[in-house]
Image (cartoon, helix red, strand yellow):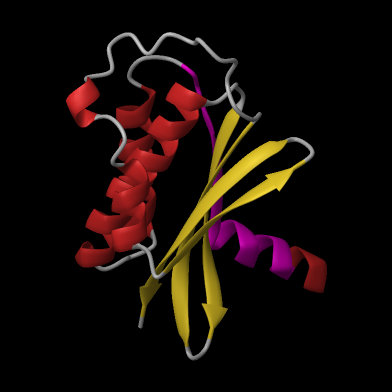
Amino acid sequence: MAAQLNTLLRAAYEHVCPVPPVAGAVSAVRRRVAMLLADWSVCPEIVEDALLVVSELVTNAIVHARPPAELRLSWVRGDGCRSLRIEVSDAGAAPAGRSLLGIDPDEHGRGEAIVHALATRHGIRIHPGGVTRWAELGTT
């Protein structure tokens, strides 16, 4: 019974979805995350920041990494508050010379700075299956 309860609680506060390496994936993932955060009753200020962080991390995985990629959202508790944790895992860096067709050079290269500015904590974890970039947005 306790195992079932833990599974239900984890499902209520954790969501995983694949990130397809195709045009339009970022906007589709953003829409899915917006619906999920509304279901979780996340405050609008956090939702706006979360959608921007999701966009940046997912774009990074699509443009700079090898598929497959996966987005994971979860709640993390600690120090009397909770944080929304956003993780995007991919299969590691794409081969050198990969074309960035369709990427406007004036709009490229700001994602890390945006994530750094919005997140209370952020980082990169390298593991045998690839790379996970993560950010936490604090709430009260």
Question: In the displayed structure, would residue 10 be above or below residue 66?
Answer: below
Would residue 42 be visible to someone looking at this image?
yes
Q: Write the start and end of the magenta stretch as one range.
A: 5-21
Please, which residue is most extreme toward the left here?
A: 106
Figure quadrant of the N terminus? bottom right
Q: Residue at x 37, y 13 (%)?
A: 100
Quick check: is 123 in the magenta stretch?
no
Q: Residue at x 59, y 21 (%)?
A: 66
Please, which residue is most extreme toward the front here?
A: 96
Residue 8 horizontal side relative to residue 104, left or right = right
Q: Residue at x 31, y 51 (%)?
A: 113
Residue 120, horizontal then vertical, whole percent: 39, 70
Quick check: is 13 in the magenta stretch?
yes
Quarter of the image for residue 96 reads: top right
Give whichever of 41, 106 is nearer the camera: 106
Residue 72, horizontal then vertical, whole percent: 55, 48
Question: In the displayed structure, would residue 37 be above or below residue 9?
Answer: above
Would residue 1 be visible to someone looking at this image?
no
Q: Residue at x 33, y 39 (%)?
A: 55
Residue 77 horizontal side relative to residue 103, left or right = right
Residue 26 horizontal side relative to residue 94, left or right = left
Give whichever of 132, 75 is nearer the camera: 132
Residue 21, horizontal then vertical, whole percent: 49, 18
Figure quadrant of the C terminus? bottom left
